[in-house]
Image (spheres, grey):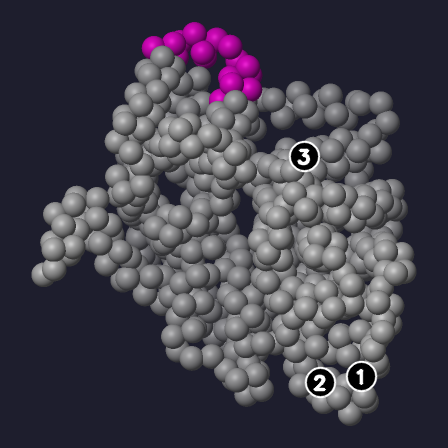
Amino acid sequence: MTAAAAGAATDPASASQLVAARLMRPLEALSALLLTVIISLLLAGVAARYVFTVPMVWADEVVSLSFLWLAMLGAVIAMHRNEHLRLTLMVEKLPERVRGYVQAFALCAVAVTLVALAGPAVDYVRDEWAIRTPELGMPNALRVAALAFGVIAMLGLVLVFALRTVAARHLVVAALVVGAVAAACSAGSASLQTLGNLNLVFFLVGVVALCLVSGVPIGFCFGLATLAYLGFATTVPLSVVVSRMDEGMSSIILVSVPVFVLLGCVLDSTGMGKAIVDVLAALLGHVRAGMSYVLLGSLFIVSGISGSKVSDMATVAPALFPEMKRRGHQPPEMIALLATGAAMADTVPPSIVLIVLGSVAGVSIAGLFQSGFVVAMVLLVVLMLLARWKSRHEVMEGVRRAPWATLRKLLLFAAPALVLPFLIRSAVGEGVATATEVSTIAVLYALVTGKILYGGLSARQVYRMLVETASLSGAILLILGTASGMAWAIAQSGVVQQLSGFLTTMPGGSWAYLAVTIAVFMILGCVLEGLPAILLLAPIMFPIARKLGIHDVHYSMVVVTAMNIGLMMPPIGVGFYVACRIGDALPDDVMGAIWPYLVALMVGLVVIAAVPWISTVAL
């Protein structure tokens, strides 16, 4: 053993990190296996129902068990990789001497959340042991044990990460501060319970805001705030949070989330996305503003395959930016168009946001898919008009139309990829299959066509994609779970009824309510990365919209569009910084260029809100 290795072995932090890394390998392999089992069972279920007319009723129980374990294992992997979604903008701007204490506070907040959940999660497993599944007779405890395992495993990883990355004095100070606040709240619990709904402001707004700006992952912001509110300001047992997490993460509709995430990975790795971009470039690249049209059109089509904004931008930008630069496009303008184009395309099915919204708000996913396509077309036209006006000084010297032979070759090569988004939309829209079933069929289609036409994928690549899908899905689904607990706490407080009474009698009726909705979701879309805003507010806002006579699908389109605009809005919007990172540009340089495009999207949003026919014509 070398001296360096011996030193590392005797260092507790390094040793614990090494142990954690080795323990993650079987967990990653198990998560990959579970995702494979889920896809295989869903495909087998489709074949059994449509080909053999013998439904596999028991398969849903196995999928449900596998899905919750996949979600929690994914959350553990994301914790190990430090990939849980968080707002880092504020922390990065702090002075170095302060940042260490804030990072220590964030880790303490995560640890406290997990400690508070651990006991109720174990009790929940014990309580569910007596409940058996209807088809296979399995104890439900086998499924919900995933929650307890995930909480305890993440707690161990947080402690290892804290010892390895944060100075001891910072941890001590942060732990003392968190402990002092908890002790003060516990001592004053009786007084807090007399404050009524003011506690919602203190805990569910104040604590969430403090944790967000401190860089606490969003799921843990919601979890800590809810646990603190229930523990100090009510007499409700904390086990309710665990049961609500189970309910929020276990909907069979949500199984399509990791499958569509995997589809995006396959799209990137096989080159199917690039084939689509190449065809559009050959068709439109020779006209003025042609490359802007290609970028927007590529995002529109590719988003109908991947379901992920990040995947869309990462596929399109490298293929188009070099040629756009050659034609005189400035990098800030290109990234501004990329960001707002991705926001436009998020209503194109199979949008993960639409799937989650349909699950949470009880809206038909088939209806959302049909409507989202038309709404995205409206936003696409608005952005194309602005791009055409901005390209009036574009350098077109040496630009030629692609020869017909080249175009024909590209069309033949890209045809299987171009078919996929229309296959997804039509299958769900016509009721042939559910979004979950279509997602698995799309993955199989992409893997087979990718293998035959686009070079295929190695076993190592597939395994890596499965693990990455588990990690991202776990981070998303953990937010769903904790947001479900917070939404329940808000609903039980009675404030929803009070808010409903105020908003339904507000002057202006449905039009005023739509204006309030746009403002709320644009603001929260900036801060909460979109999905959490939907998870928190959909159970509150949609019943009010129904009372005012607003169509569910129309309201959904307004919500999603407003949220996506907020997501790309500087200086806070998370998606804006993701686009800057993909385009390799400084946010300060892009900030001025993006506003005209955001204004164009806002104009499109006003049109969509004012003309319900746009959202409902395809239903």
Image: 614 above or below 505: below
Q: Residue at x 68, y 65 (%)?
A: 321
Q: Which residue is mark 3?
A: 523
The tag on residue 410 is 2
Decide: marks 3, 1 in contact (CB < 8 A)? no
Decide: few, some or many residues near mark 1? Use Cα within 10 Å; few <14, some 14-19, many ≥20: some
Distance of label 2 from label 3 (alpha carbons): 42 Å
Q: Residue furthest bottom?
A: 405
**Dividing the picture into quarters, in which one does residue 97 lie?**
top left
Q: Position of residue 528 (x, y in %)?
A: 58, 39
Q: Is residue 278 left or right of residue 71?
A: right
Disc 3 marks a residue whose amino acid type is Ile
Give the residue type at disc 1.
Ala
From this viewpoint, is residue 58 visible? no
Please provide percent x and percent y for residue 63.
43, 62
Q: Which residue is mark 1?
A: 402
Could you tell me which secondary element the residue under label 1 belongs to?
loop
* Image quadrant where one finds the C terminus: bottom right
**Mark 3 and mark 1: span between their CA atoms?**
44 Å
Q: Is residue 197 magenta?
A: yes
Q: Identify the secondary structure beneath mark 3.
A: helix
The residue shown at (31%, 56%) is 138
| Residue at point 87%, 42% (across, down) | 610
Check the picture and name the quadrant holding the N terminus.
bottom left
Per the rendered image, the range of residues in magenta is 186-204
Q: Name above or below for residue 482 compared with residue 197.
A: below
* Contact between labelled residues 1 and 2, with CB atoms less than 8 Å apart: yes
Taking depth in this image into account, of 308 and 234 the one nearest to the observer is 308
**Number of the front mark, 3 or 1:** 1
Number of numbered callouts drawn: 3
